Amino acid sequence: PAPAPPLPTMRLNEELANCRLALLAAYAMPDNAEGTHGKGAGWSAALRGSSSAGCLARGSVAAVHARGARSQLRASAVETEAPAKAIPATEERRELTDEELFANDGDAKTVYFNARDQVGIFEPFGYFDPLGYCPDDDRDKFRFLRASEIKHGRVAMLASVGAVVAHFIRIPGYERTRGSLLSEWDSAFGYPTILLTTATICVMFWLELTFWAQREDKEPGDFGDPLNFNMYNEDMRNKEINNGRAAMFAALGIWAAQAATDKDAMQQLGFF
């Protein structure tokens, strides 16, 4: 069976049926009903549409019907309306923490992110990405590239210092190394030094996959503070990034000059 119509609809249907019956009864009423010619004539004439009084009567009946329907609907709405919920007071605005921002977010890209607000952005270049490698709203790609930049910078700082130290100190097995790149290559991959070179490469791979693996809940390049220097702040992070960028240029310049002149880093200065 079809479901019963809602209560307001049932009441409205009943009212319409009653109005139709009343209209039929008034139409059938003679003009001289109840011994008052004017009253009967007014109603019958109104329903027949033969005078201005009939128009007024029709308007009155429609108005009564409309008011009744509105009353029924208003009463039904009041009966079925749920109590309004109280609007909580506006809390004082504050800056959200990273835990609050990413707690219930499976996709980090949906969270507001702007690479121009991160550390390592300096004037006059600002967010320097002329080739468009990393959109400033792509958090995942920015974190990957920033972690790569920091690691390359740290390796370059060690390499540039090592290029200077290697002029004065020779590791056992590398005593025959001279200033040229070819001589250093032969020393690193000759026997028995290739054993030390291979072991060093294996240890570096192991560290990259364990202790130096980038964690999602850490900032790019943050692998802890094992020596308790307590220097991981915005100022020191900016200095490290800047020094790493300079060291990458320095290491590249040392190797280029060494390939062109067969002189090591200290010999290139002309003092040794």
Image (cartoon, helix red, strand yellow):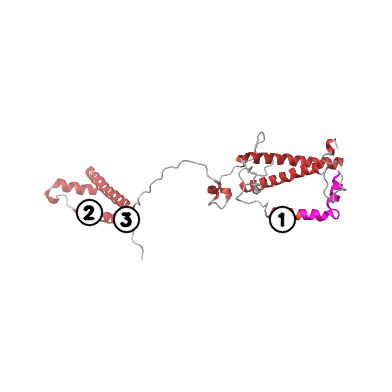
What residue did someone put label 2 on? 22
The three-letter code of the residue at mark 1 reads Trp
Q: Give the Cα distance between marks 3 and 1.
A: 76 Å
Q: Residue 6 magenta-drawn?
A: no
The reply to whether residue 129 is visible in this rendering is no
Q: Earlier in the sequence, mark 1 or mark 2?
A: 2
Which range of residues does the magenta coloring cover?
180-200
Q: CA distance from mark 1 to mark 2?
A: 96 Å
Q: Along the line of sight, which residue is nearer the eye, 37 or 131?
A: 131
Disc 2 packing (10 Å; few <14; some 14–19; many ≥20): few
Q: Secondary structure at mark 2?
A: helix
- Specify the quadrant that holds the N terminus: bottom left
Disc 2 residue type (three-letter): Ala
Name which residue type carries label 3.
Thr
Query: Is 195 within the magenta?
Result: yes
On residue 206, which mark appears? 1
> Which of the numbered marks, if any, corresponds to residue 143?
none
Q: Residues within 10 Å of mark 3 (few under 14, many from 20)?
A: some
CA–CA distance in space, label 3 to label 2: 20 Å
- Image quarter hosting the C terminus: top right
Q: Pinpoint residue 77: horizontal percent, then vertical percent.
A: 32, 51
80 relative position to 229: left or right: left
SS state under label 1: helix
Q: Residue furthest top?
A: 124
Q: Earlier in the sequence, mark 3 or mark 1?
A: 3
Foreground pick, 110 / 227: 227
- Mark on residue 9? 3
State left or right for residue 97 relative to residue 255. left
| Front residue of this view, candidates 142 and 232 | 232
Residue 32: percent from left, percent from top: 14, 49
